[in-house]
Amino acid sequence: MLLSSIPASAGRIHAPPFLDGTDADLALYRRISLTLRAQPPSSLFRYLLPEGKHLMQMGDQKNWVWARLMRHAHARYSDLPTSGPVAGNGVVLNSVPERIVYEALHPVIPPDAALDLEPAIGGLTRNQNFFSDFGIRVAGQVRYLEIVGACGSDRVFRNAWEEHLLQQFDKRLGHYTAYKIIPEIWYLDHIIDPQRMRQRFQEILADLRRTAS
C-alpha cells in the first residue's frame, strides 16, 4: 500500500497493544528498508525469524495495522526510502518485490549486459500478451527472471490472496513450458538478501557469456 493512500484516520484507530510496533520492530523495519532500498511488504518478515516474528504477525492482521506501522516508522525515521513500486531513480515496477530486485541489480549491471523490464516471451509477433518480469541479457542471450511475491520457495501461502497469486504464477509457468523455456525464479526468501541476489545475477551473467561465446 502506498503511503499516500493511507487514510489520515488510520493512525488514530484504537488498537490493542499487541498491534503496536515496538521499538525493536521499528528499528528492524528501518534496517531492512535501508538494506533493500525499498520499504518491504510485511510478508518478507516471515523470512527474518525470530526477530521479525512480531512484524510477520502484524502483517497478517487487517491492512490498517500495517499502514499504521508505516506511519509510525515515517514519524520516527527521516531516512527511509520511498514506499511503493517506484524505484529511487524513478523507474516504475509492477510491485514492491520487483522493485526490491531492481534496486539490488541495477547498480551492478556491467557494460556488456542489460536488465530488461517485462521483455516479451517468444517475440512480439508470436505472443503479445506474455511478458517476463525481467530479462537478463548478454549479447542476444536472455535469461528470463520471474519474481514470486506470493510466498517463499517452500510455496507455503498464508491466506487466500497469496494462494490466488501462486495459482496465477503457476499458469504463467505453463506459458514458459509451451516455449520450452525454463525461467529463473526468485521467491520472497530469495529477495530478502540483496547480496545473494547480486551473486546469483553474476552467475547468470557468466552462464550467458559462455553461451554467447
Image: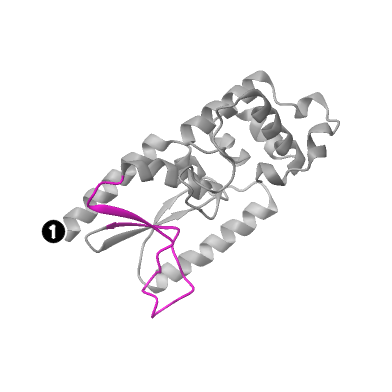
Residue 58 colored in magenta in the image: no
- Chief SS of the magenta region: loop
Residue lying at the far left in this picture: please name it: 213
- Tally the numbered discs: 1
Please determine whether, in this image, residue 131 is positioned above or below residue 32: below
Answer whether residue 153 is visible to the viewer in this image.
Answer: no
Q: Amino acid at mark 1?
A: Ser
Residue at 52% across / 30% down in the picture?
A: 32
Residue 188 picture location, percent across and down: 51, 44
The image quarter containing residue 25 is top right
Residue lying at the far right in this picture: please name it: 14
Residue lying at the far bottom in this picture: please name it: 125
Q: Which residues are magenta?
A: 109-137
Label 1: few (<14), some or many (≥20) within 10 Å?
few
Q: Nearer the viewer, residue 163 or 42?
A: 42
Residue 95 picture location, percent across and down: 55, 51
Reading the image, the residue beneath label 1 is: 213
Residue 194 picture location, percent across and down: 41, 37
Q: Secondary structure at mark 1?
A: loop
The image quarter containing residue 57 is top right
Residue 126 picture location, percent across and down: 39, 80
